Amino acid sequence: MTSPGGNPRDAVIVQAVRSPLCRARKGGLADLPPSSLLTAVLQGVLLKEPQSPDRQQPDAYLVPPEDVQDVCVGNVLSPPTAAVSFRMASLASGLPHSASISTVNRQCSSGLQSISNIAHAIQCGSIDVGIGAGVESMSYNPMHELYEKFPPEVDWEKMQSCGNKEVMDCLIPMGVTSENVAKKFDLDRRTLDEFAAKSHEKAAKAREQGKFKAEIVPISDCSEDDGIRPSTTADKLSRLKPVFDKKNGSTTAGNSSQLTDGAAAVLLMSRQKAMERNLPIMGVWKSYAVEGVPPKIMGVGPVYAIPSALKKASLTKDDIDLFEINEAFASQAYYSVLELGLDADKVNPNGGAIALVSLDRIFFALFSTLSTQYFSKGHP
């Protein structure tokens, strides 16, 4: 419900939706290009009933499309022409040409960065209404082809001789950085498999209880996530062979995030506009932080970003009811929880990227859980 308190220029979240999150190449969305996934969520996020879209009725919209001023889309793997594809997707969704669009790439946090860009534009008065979105099709744009098609455009001789070893560390594959984290912080294979199995267990339970239904916009005949593995156990995961260090490694396909196709969108506006429209407020954008870490252990960013964001909001970790932390790999996710001293029951209560995927999901899953369980504060 709306509240009269707060600053009129607060950036507030009034709706968040996503597509089903499906396995790349094998799942229900494998045949659809990223633009089709994006169109579906951009349509759904503006509707009062996202699961039963009927754009023909004048009162079908929570917010009229013509009121949206800007859209920002997070994406990692699509080619440079994605800027055109996503503009086409935006127009196809029913948004007018007056709703501008931009794209952003912050790797696993690209969707979250898109939300941040829109929230900050609202806070500073540049816009009143905007959409932060994320989309990825790992079926259309496989990760392993990225460097083959688009190698870094650098002067290799200068990069190798500049005297900064971290320059070349930027080329270390993410899976190898996961192994680096596990070795550096003494994380054993069993612990990582147990963490991964728990992610699937929590996600399966949440799906069984119908917790995801309200946030999913069906696409074609696909209306459920198809990558969750309810029968997964640590014992079963222990049979999988390491991928990146075949002799002494601990990172496997089972304790890494799945390859996924999906999209998500979050509708934000100023508190003043939400009050004027009498719209429900799911949450208020309070703080945001990014922190760089050594490239060879890139996944440990939450260890530094979370305290930074809390400090900016004048909060401590004990003030937070729920944390959503990206599970790119069990190693970096588990280490982040361990190092920060978080209560495990407060982290990813409905499963994480090992069972699902990140996109914008870490953000609206947070608000969905907060609203259904009557908590008050969360940290993506």
Image: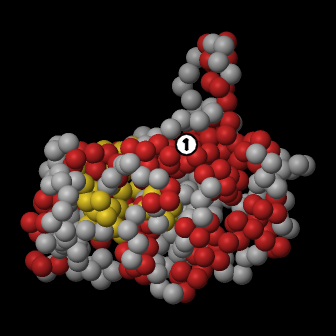
- Nearer-the-camera pick, 65 or 365: 365
Q: Quadrant of residue 6?
A: bottom left
Does residue 145 show up? no
Which residue is pictured at 17% across the width and 78% down the height? 60
Disc 1 target residue: 304
Query: Horizontal and vertical percent for residue 205?
Result: 58, 82
Percent coordinates x, y for residue 248 in the rendering = 88, 49
Residue 270, by quadrant, is: bottom left
- Residue 8's place in the image compared with 83, above or below, is below
Question: Residue placed at 47% from the left, 43% from the top?
Answer: 308
Give the residue drawn at x 28%, y 62%.
13
Count of marks overlaid on the render: 1
Q: Is residue 13 visible?
A: yes
Coloration of the structure image:
secondary structure
Q: Nearer the viewer, residue 203 or 257?
A: 203
Q: Nearer the viewer, residue 301 or 146?
A: 301
- Residue at the far bottom in the pictured view: 209
Amino acid type, mark 1: Tyr
Give the answer, above or below, for where 369 lies relative to 73.
below
Would residue 58 appear left or right of 132 to someone viewing this image? left
Which residue is at the front of the view, 109 or 308? 308
Q: In the image, residue 44 lies at what x, y percent?
A: 30, 71
**Relative image position of residue 348 (x, y in whole percent):** 55, 66
Disc 1: CA contacts within 10 A as few (<14), some (14-19) or many (>=20): some
Q: Secondary structure at mark 1?
A: helix
From the viewer's perspective, tell me whether residue 72 is left or right of residue 269.
right
Q: At x 23% / y 75%, what residue is drawn?
A: 1
